Image: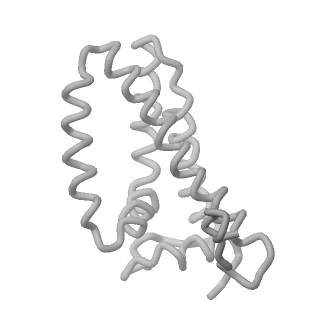
Amino acid sequence: MNALGFDARAVSTRVGVASAAKMCRSVMIKGIEALTVECLGAARAYGADALVLASLRETFDRSATMPDLPGYLVSRVAEHGRRRAAEMREVAETVREGGVEPEMSAACARLQDRFVDRMAEHDIDYQTLQPFDWANLLDRLDGRQR
């Protein structure tokens, strides 16, 4: 395959890992694309696109150098998910008022609420997770004890 110009390599001895990795990566990439459409559609409607883009540039520049970006992102949901879900419901209303259907904003609110609900169902308190380990938390929530 490599001789034909393909980037073929074994990634695991388990069947399906490569396909799962591709699909899971797509959650992130296609999700970012969809968020961008919703965010900038609403920002344009309000005449705030230049301000939003400048703010995003700063955020993404800082994030690019974080040693544990996944840990930071998951920890924000674990610690502040309930408050952020409420904020995202307000965001969804603002997006809707701008003439854009807030599909991603509404989904974000539901996910943040559900994540905190799942932590409560498993008797997991964020304060007990220090130092924070995102993989350990996700494993515990999904019944994969390490």
Looking at the image, residue 88 sits to the left or right of residue 28; the answer is left
Q: Give whichever of 12, 80 is nearer the camera.
A: 12
Residue 79: image x %, image y %?
A: 40, 61
Residue 6: image x %, image y %?
A: 63, 63
Residue 120: image x %, image y %?
A: 58, 64
Q: Give whichever of 40, 119 is nearer the camera.
A: 40
Q: Quadrant of residue 71?
A: bottom left
Quadrant showing the N terminus: bottom right
Residue 68: image x %, image y %?
A: 35, 72
Q: Specify the color scheme.
A: one colour
Q: Quadrant of residue 98?
A: top left
How many tags in the picture?
Answer: 0
Question: 110 above or below 70?
Answer: above
Residue projecting furthest to the front: 3
Q: Quadrant of residue 39?
A: top left
- Residue name at image x 26 percent, y 23 percent: 49
Quadrant showing the C terminus: bottom right
- Residue name at image x 38 percent, y 59 percent: 76
Looking at the image, residue 23 sits to the left or right of residue 126; the answer is right
Q: Give whichever of 141, 44 is nearer the camera.
A: 44
Residue projecting furthest to the right: 15
- Residue name at image x 70 percent, y 64 percent: 20
